[in-house]
Image (tube, coloured by chain):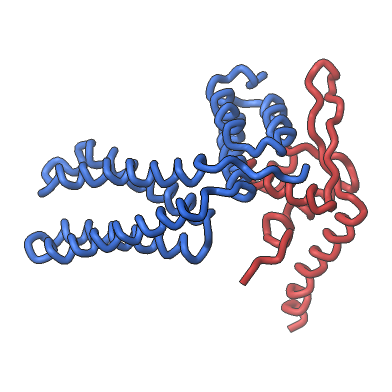
Chain colours: A blue, B red
Amino acid sequence: MNTSADPFVAAAFKLCSAMMPPARSEWLHAMHIEATYIDGRFQARAFALGCCWGCLKERMSTMEFVHKAARLAMTLGMLALGIVAALSAWRVADDHGPTGLVFALLSIAFLASGLWSCVRGPAAVVQAASTMLIVSAVSFVALHSSIGEDWFNLHLYRALSVEGILIWGVLLGGALFLKPAKPVAA
Amino acid sequence: MPRQPNNSPQTRAVLAALLGGGGDWRHGYDLMRETGLKSGTLYPILIRLTESGLLEAEWRQAVPPARAPRHAYRLTAQGRAFAHAAAQREMAPRSREALQ
């Protein structure tokens, strides 16, 4: 079965072409052609998704992510949000333990991401932001399903998940696309 | 501590698969199936190996020729030496364990 016409595969490679550094376009072409040789729609889709991840890694390894100032601002922003969340946790912990715990976890996530970005450099912003974006998105879906219907402060948790998607989405988008990829030796 | 380049278990698996191919040209999907690696792991490794001169990549005519040419890979002489050395490094601790 020829999977080259599969819209999912086509969309995945369109995303790949947006992420792959131009100097490595031949590799992207190689991946795309390889996908057409794979029998089975599921296998071709899995292959294409993997290629998206590979292209993202290539972009991370070759790009000048952001100007140093923007990177510093992102890191400081994460640390500041961590402190705000820690203060919120401290204030609400006595009134409502679970809410305090949610804020404490948020604080840990922000502070750990900020510190991770300081220690490991620009690629860490992408790693931290993509991880937290997934966590926020999963929380958003879970909180809008029947799981948390009877929870106290459900609206607050939902708002926090939306806020998380926005904050981490902006951080990820900023880290990936503020600065174009550095040309790499072919 | 910085990692040694081209020394991850995944890279060693790719090198072993290419070495086992006996110098034949291999395709990305074949290597994926043999090593169990995902495409998102395999292709960055192939790129690194090619850029460091351990691997050569070439567009090869497909069979049947009506289909688009396909990217194929094989180790260079330097790559074969590197892959042999990596395989020996991996075997050495096992041999020591077997002797104990």
* Left or right placement of residue A148 versus residue B94 in this view: left
Q: Position of residue B30 (x, y in %)?
A: 74, 39
- Is residue A43 something one can see in this rendering? no
Is residue A156 or residue B20 the one in the foreground? A156
Q: Return the residue found at the far right.
A: B77
- Residue lying farthest to the bottom in this orientation: B100
**Of the pair B65 and A58, the residue shown nearer to us:** A58
Please tell me in which quadrant of the rendered image residue B84 appears. Answer: bottom right
Looking at the image, residue B63 lies above or below residue A183: above
Q: Residue furthest left?
A: A95
* Horizontal arrangement in the rendering, residue A37 relative to residue B75 (left or right): left
In the rendered image, which quarter contains the N terminus of chain B? bottom right
Query: Residue A27 is drawn in which quadrant?
Result: top right
Residue at x 85% of width, y 19% of height: B65
Name the quarter where the C terminus of chain B is drawn.
Answer: bottom right
Q: Position of residue B89 (x, y in %)?
A: 79, 70
What residue do we see at 83% from left, 24% from top?
B62
* Total numbered circles: 0
**Is A26 located above or below residue B68 in the figure?**
below
Residue at point 74%, 33% (across, down): A26
Question: Can you say whether B36 is above or below B28 in the image?
Answer: below
Q: Position of residue A117 (x, y in %)?
A: 46, 60
Q: Residue at x 51, y 55 (%)?
A: A68
**For residue B12, what is the image quadrant?**
bottom right
